[in-house]
Amino acid sequence: MTQPGTACITGASAGIGAAFARRLARDGYDLILHGRREPQLKTLCEELQRAHHVSAEYVCAELSSPDDLHRLEERVRAEPALALLVNNAGFGTRGRFGEEDINLQDAMIQTHITAPVRLTYAALPGMLSRKTGAIINVSSVAGFLVSPGSVIYCATKAALTSFSESLNLELRGTGVCVQALCPGFTRSEFHQRLGIDTSGDFFRHFMDAGDVVDASMRCLRRGRVVCIPGLKYKFAAIAPRFLPRRVVYGLGNLYQKMRRNSP
């Protein structure tokens, strides 16, 4: 577990990213918040500075843009007290792979894979020299599953989880640790951005973003590399290892039909 220093959080405008910002500010961390929406970031920084008397700055950047990503990398690399990096930024799509804009799919790969890898690479030298630090990569339970209509999403989240586990093994004994946070359905703007009506009964059972962050921090304290908040999501992640693949494929097709019938 890191001691409060500076934490950098990507995708901090809302949802899990904003919940991380509020939790870490309460714990005494200074903040570098990333997002694409300046008004929300500015308001959040002002709120956290006022409530917790910490330093909070923001960087507006599109992580699928090499120039914008490079700018954030340099800010991360230059931070002398970086204790925690939270790679949280991400998005989803509803369409089938062959029907979606390939540029949008490529942007997802850049956001979910390239950006966390490059930001982690930028953060590591300072953390290793100080012999302390943590990196939380926000993956998803979807990385353990297969789902038509979420082809690139599932694939990138699976890769992000694997990257986190392998890197954590590399870093054993250095004082730096890596976590793959794999939440299931969580109340945020994620589904609204996909045009899905979240007012129905199904969405009322989603996890609260603050509870997801609390679970992540507990796992960090306990040294758990893969953190899956919620018992039902732990089961969802483990079950495909023991089910025949034809059953897994059938469940994936069933979920896709449910998504298609969503408003």
Image (cartoon, rainbow, N blue to C red):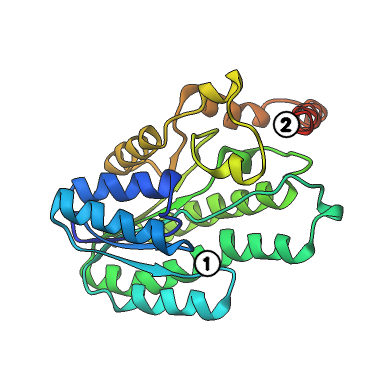
Q: Amino acid at mark 2?
A: Pro
Kindly indicate the quadrant of the structure image that contains residue 19: top left
Q: Badge 2: how crowded within 10 Å, few (<14), some, or many (20+)?
A: few
Residue at disc 1, secondary structure: helix
Q: Residue furthest right?
A: 98
User: Which three-letter amino acid code belongs to the residue tagged 1?
Assistant: Ala
Instruction: For residue 176, say whether it is visible.
Output: no
Which numbered mark, 1 or 2, is in the foreground of this view? 2
Q: At which x and y percent is residue 191?
A: 60, 40
Q: Is residue 171 left or right of residue 157?
A: left
- Residue carrying label 1: 115
In front here: 166 or 84? 84
The reply to whether residue 32 is visible in this rendering is yes
- Horizontal side of residue 245 vs 36, given as left or right: right
Q: Which residue is drawn at the image coordinates 77% and 43% (left, top)?
A: 149
Please state the horizontal and vertical placement of residue 146, each as a whole percent of the image.
72, 39
In the shown orientation, is residue 15 left or right of residue 128?
Answer: right
- State yes or no: discs 1 and 2 in contact (Cβ < 8 Å): no
Q: Is residue 49 above or below residue 203?
A: below
Q: How many residues crowd around disc 1 within 10 Å: few (fewer than 14), some, or many (20 or more)?
A: many
Q: Position of residue 196 (x, y in %)?
A: 66, 36
Q: Secondary structure at mark 2?
A: loop
**Residue at image coords 28%, 73%:** 126
Q: Which residue occupies 34% across, 47% down?
A: 20
Quarter of the image holding residue 199? Answer: top right
Counting residues from the N terminus, which is met first, the one under dot 1 or under dot 2?
1
Q: Quadrant of the C terminus?
A: top right
Residue at left 40%, top 56%? 40
Q: Which mark is residue 263?
A: 2
